Amino acid sequence: METRKLVIKNIGLILSGDMQNPIFDGDCIIAIDGKISAWGKEKDLDTEGATTLVDAKGVTLAPGLIDSHVHPVIGDYTPRQQQINWIDSTLHGGVTTLISAGEVHLPGRPKDVVGLKAMAIASQRWYENFRPSGVKVHAGAPILENGMVEQDFKDLADAGVKLLGEVGLGTVKDGKTAKQMVGWARKYGIQSTIHTGGPSIPGSGLIDADMVLETGTDVIGHINGGHSALPDDQIICLCESCTAGLEIVHNGNERAALLTLNTARELKQLDRVILGTDGPAGSGVQPLGILRMVAMLSSLGDIPAEIAFCFANGNTSRQRELDTGILEVGKCADFVLMDQAQHAPGKNILESVQMGNLPGVGMTIIDGVVTSLRSRNTPPADRLPEVI
């Protein structure tokens, strides 16, 4: 089989996804068979024999963005807002990987143990076998229901399930039971997220800081509420009292998002901050939700844009143990190429984003394959990369 070699040259700025070193020196990056192999100055790299050659035209390259909190259903369709092709639209917002927080919007979702396990395994399979528009969807995230036993978690893990849906969306509402089940999940390598804050839809309930801390999940899901946030003192308590991921979502409370950000900064733990949209939901679908979060947190939270982008890729990559979202040799060649939007204020893309403006997406690449060109959803970019 022929080796696939991607060469992207004339890059104006390389963002790494690593908060400790957010900007890499160089104007060229190379991927072999979908994996990053080298980057730096074009003159120092072996660019011969490219099967795909992209002229970046001076735009910025970053690891593809990751949405840490979505609620997919099946394929590229969700009945929550009768949305078709919402994942394709999200790709046009620079997002190349989605993480399910539970396939809760399936009409008639089974709540018996046999049914919920069957649905989780089926969901994991259909997104493993089908990538809408090339996007990687990590799904098959079962909702905890009373009656589950340790063997159920072993069965799920053996079948390839790696995530729990938001703890608290099912019948398990007490910290003691939730903690036991989260422990079983962790024993078999399944990562956990908890619903945080007030009810999201009729039938769900309040989950306060005490239950979040007692349950001990890996990620504090929508710490800024989905939709209603906890009181300030509880949010601060969560930041200070554990080491779990602090997930800030678009469909939450923006003021609580900034409180979380500022508390994490005071604790010198910004590496815990990860971003999601929590869509599709009552707020709708936000194809540009992750970019909007980056711009909002950068501008109102006084965070350099190159660091805010790390919340949307590298931080999530580490928290979720992914092989994408950060520029490292051997990681997946998943990229977003973007530029300052036409007529947007600021001297360059970073300054423009830190002033609260969205960049224009010009191309996405997944596993070294070009998956979209000029975005139909972002404002038009000053410059557009092209495949030569």
Image (cartoon, rainbow, N blue to C red):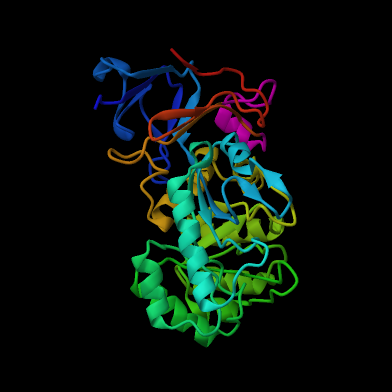
Q: Is residue 258 magenta?
A: no
Nearer to me, 330 or 223: 330
Residue 219 seen from this side: no
Measuring from the top left, give residue 309's x and y in whole percent: 51, 42
- Name the residue at 64% across, 57% down: 257
Nearer to me, 352 or 10: 10
Measuring from the top left, give residue 110's x and y in whole percent: 59, 71
| Residue furthest bottom as drawn | 176
Q: Which residues are magenta?
A: 339-357
Q: Quadrant of the C terminus?
A: top left
Residue 388 seen from this side: yes
User: Number of callouts in the render?
Assistant: 0
Measuring from the top left, give residue 369's x and y in whole percent: 41, 29
- Compared to 72, does 31 lie above or below? above
Quadrant housing residue 361: top right
- Name the residue at 61% across, 18% down: 382
Quadrant housing residue 282: bottom right
Measuring from the top left, give residue 250's x and y in whole percent: 66, 52
Horizontal arrangement in the rendering, residue 9 relative to residue 277 (left or right): left
- Name the residue at 65% across, 28% down: 376
Q: Main secondary structure of the magenta part?
A: loop
Q: Is residue 349 magenta?
A: yes
- Compared to 387, does 149 lie above or below? below
- Name the residue at 67% across, 21% down: 342
Q: Quadrant of the N terminus?
A: top left
